[in-house]
Image (tube, rainbow, N blue to C red):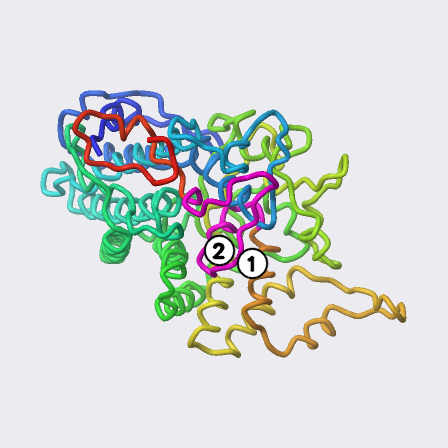
Amino acid sequence: MKLNILKTVVLAIGVSTAFVSCSDDFVETKFYQDVEQAPLTSLNEVEAFQRGMYTSMRATTYYGRDYTVYGEARSDEMYSNGYAGYFNTVYNYSMTSADAYARDTWAQIYTAVGKANILINTDVNSITGSDADRKAVRYHIGQAHVLRAMFFFDLLKLYGQKYTGGNLGIVTPLKYDPKALQGRGTIAENEAQITTDFNAGLAMMQANNQGITDRGTLTINGAKAVMSRFFLYKKDYARVRTLTDEIIASAQYQVIPAASYAGSWESPKQNNSIFELEVGVAGANGTNSLGYIYNYNGYGNIVMEESLYDSYVDDVRSELVDFTDDEYYLYKYPSLEGADNLKIVRFEEVLLNGIEAELNGGSALKALNYYKNILSNRLGDTTNPITGAVITLQERLDAITSVDMNMLKTERSKELVGEGLRQWDLLRWGDAVPRPAGASTDIRLTAFPIPRAETDLAGTPIVANPGYDN
């Protein structure tokens, strides 16, 4: 790949040494384009780049909306109803190499990669200031390694051929070089690089620990949580078990109680949040936000399957679903302005990862305990449909004496719906991924097209994904 999309990376970063804070907002107010030409030399500049990565992540074309929707629209739990014309090509598997979704998400994530690369390649010895400043810089470089691994993983899931019969992955640039030519690596090479980045980043963060526990930034536990997601997809269950144990042992998180569940989605940094992106009014995506695409009073384009809603039996999670005009609308992000913080990884997901890992070579009892921990904070008393007798929550829990993979799969859908994970779950399990009537059944189209803007570059070594028009 000729990294032409990275030529404007630093210009668009807003490498700012001055940020204005208003509640949970952070707004870049000064742009030092000359930093593009020179190494970062201060903790201030390094922290600006770190915030710049978060700014890239919360964009509409990444976690701010599109990337999350991709994992839902192509799943068994949500679908696109076609309203306002959004996500039709994604949902109907009718994308072309010029498709805006494939093009813009590719560009956005590689912009984030470019920012991470500038941080990672910073010469710590050239940082002015104290030894404490340089230690903090090393911590931020560790964060950048972890986030770059996350960016590569997200790209690999979307554009890689792991589930299409091929062996090609994505381009993995390791330094900022807008003149570089680089082709796609294999899936195995990509996964090895992601593993290396995760391990290196976590080690640097631990060795240079700043004692940061703010859920609006990537902490050591946040790194472990996103790592558990990757290693689950790799089927490295032993690693997932270790990471889950360590996060639990920190005693910093809990499954959000039933009484607080609905409100937790519009309240920042709750006790179940491990890593979230701060948004606020100034950083909101407005009509291009995730909430606007989910909510009935917005575009209401991505809605829940009726079968999933029906699975909530006296379950607090149903409070976030509204049935209007014969469709089920999810309100995990209720703000139509898009001001709600974006939950990247929650404690509940870590427990679900842990359940699956324990069911694959671990402790059945531990898996059951994790499972009941979630349900005890989601279910309530119910009624026997035949006798009319009340069945208490404790009786419901006592009746569960074991958990299996089918129960885990159902619970992942009920708990994580709308968070962008479901398609990837179905694919890694080898389960059927439903396609709408009339959509192509060509399995190659599971991978997004490599944008024509990349494959048409003169002399590019990058090759297209088969099944598309480039």
Q: Is residue 262 above or below residue 63?
A: below
Numbered badge on residue 221: none
Q: Where does the image place residue 32, in percent across and percent down from the top left?
A: 24, 21
**Label pair 1/2, CB-CB below 8 angstroms:** yes
Residue found at x 77% / y 34%: 325
Residue found at x 69% / y 44%: 321
Q: Provide the residue designation for mark 2.
A: 425
Q: Nearer the viewer, residue 326 or 183?
A: 183
> 10 Å neighbourhood of mark 1: few (<14), some, or many (≥20)?
some
Residue found at x 54% / y 69%: 405
Q: Which residue of the protein is positioned furthest toward the left in this rendering?
A: 125
Magenta region includes residue 428: yes
Q: Where does the image place residue 143, in percent across and percent down from the top left?
A: 29, 47
Residue range of the region highlighted in magenta in the rendering: 417-446
Q: Where does the image place residue 237, in percent across and percent down from the top left?
A: 39, 68
Residue found at x 46% / y 28%: 283
Numbered badge on residue 412: 1
| Amino acid type for the residue under numbered disc 1 | Arg
Magenta region includes residue 194: no
Q: Is residue 399 above or below residue 340?
A: below
